[in-house]
Amino acid sequence: EGNAGLRGGPAGNLIITIEELKHEIFERRGDDVIMVLPLSFPKAALGTSVEIPTLTGKAKLNIPAGTQSGKILRMRGKGIPRLHGAGIGDQLVQIQVYVPTKLSIAEKQLLKQLMDSPNLEPKANGHPNIFQRFKESLNL
């Protein structure tokens, strides 16, 4: 309740407005935070472990071999605390496989050797699209 009203009127209400500022790394979705992680093709294909920022510092994230661009990995308990102490949201990490625009001669030669490998060709309808993967990651 606010202060007493004018001329003996009822107490008013105290209204507080909170505005969140846009963060340079994270986007908030309820109690979860989302970030995009650029990753090289070799790291996505072979798998790796990377250290990424969280709201409370840095944490190690294991990237499984064969990770596709658009895949969303969930880090449980790395989001925003829920109201009234009912747990903590998650951090969602969307993988964005980086394709360089300029390559050295040696890099071009290596990629040309891989270009004809049938295992590296995309399979039609073999993988869900980015929207299907996002819905799956949010359990919708």
Image (cartoon, grey):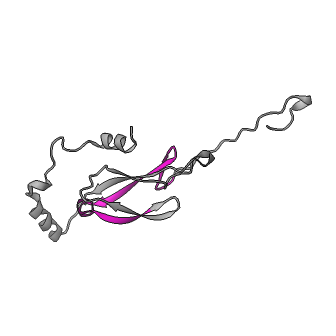
**In which quadrant is the C terminus drawn?**
top left
Task: Identify which residue, 98 or 65, lies in the foreground.
Answer: 65
Measuring 36% from the left and 65% from the top, which residue is drawn there? 50
Q: Position of residue 2 (x, y in %)?
A: 80, 38
Q: Could you tell whether 29 is left or right of 135 in the image? A: right
Name the residue located 23 percent from the left edge and 56 percent from the top edge. 66
Q: Measuring 61% from the left and 49% from the top, which residue is drawn there?
A: 85
Which one is in front, 8 or 78? 78
Q: Which residues are magenta?
A: 23-52
Please check the rendered image and state whether residue 26 is part of the magenta-colored stretch, yes or no.
yes
Single out the residue that lies furthest toward the front: 86
Q: Residue furthest right?
A: 7
> Residue 88 at what x, y percent from top left?
53, 51
Q: How many marks?
A: 0
The residue depicted at 37 percent of the width and 45 percent of the height is 137
**Quick one: quadrant of the N terminus?**
top right
Residue 64 position in % (x across, y down): 29, 59
Taking 62 as reference, is 59 left or right? right
Residue 19: x and y in percent read 61, 45
Q: Is residue 32 magenta?
A: yes
- From the viewer's perspective, tell me whether residue 26 is left or right of residue 62: right
Image position of 47 (left or right of 73): left
